[in-house]
Image: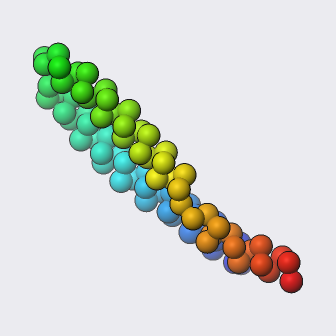
């Protein structure tokens, strides 16, 4: 029972991050359409787009996953 709840908590955390970044990507796509005739904005748009992808990966990567699975490890050692 605890394993299922821990996995649900992990899935919830990751889905929250991904949903927030989906909003960021939606704004980026809106801005891309808005400035499609401005050459300098295209370069900046790609830089911000790549930065957004990197920050999503970092945000998911730096989570304290030990908090999700720490209780399972402790119980298995007893």
Left or right, residue 68 beside residue 25: right
Q: Residue pushed farthest right?
A: 78
Image quadrant holding the C terminus, namely bottom right
**Front residue (pair 12, 64):** 64
Is 38 located above or below residue 69 in the figure?
Answer: above
Instruction: Name the residue at the bottom extreme.
Output: 78
Locate residue 55, reporting x and y percent: 41, 45
Q: For this view, does 58 lie left or right of residue 51?
A: right
The percent position of residue 18, horizontal first and vertical second, equals 43, 51
In the picture shown, does residue 44 fall above or below 72? above
The residue at the point 43 percent across, 55 percent down is 17
Give the residue at x 24% y 41%: 27
Q: Is residue 13 shown above or below 2?
A: above
Q: How is the image coloured?
A: rainbow
| Res. 25 image quadrant | top left
Q: Position of residue 28 (x, y in %)?
A: 26, 36
45 to 75, vertically: above or below: above
* Image quadrant in which you'd find residue 47: top left
Q: Answer whether residue 59 is visible to the viewer in this image.
A: yes
Quarter of the image containing the N terminus?
bottom right
Residue at the image position 53 percent from the left and 60 percent from the top = 63
Count up the numbered dots.
0
The answer to whether residue 4 is visible is no
Residue 69 is situated, as x and y percent measured from the top left of the image, at 68, 69
Residue at 54% across / 52% down in the picture?
A: 61
Q: Nearer the viewer, residue 1 or 60?
A: 60
């Amino acid at each position: 029972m605890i394993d299922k709840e821990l996995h649900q908590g992990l899935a919830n955390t990751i889905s929250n991050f991904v949903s927030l970044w989906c909003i960021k990507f939606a704004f980026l796509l809106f801005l891309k359409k808005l400035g499609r005739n401005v050459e300098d904005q295209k370069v900046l748009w790609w830089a911000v787009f790549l930065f957004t992808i990197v920050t999503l990966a970092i945000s998911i990567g730096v989570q304290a996953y030990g908090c999700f699975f720490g209780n399972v490890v402790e119980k298995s050692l007893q």
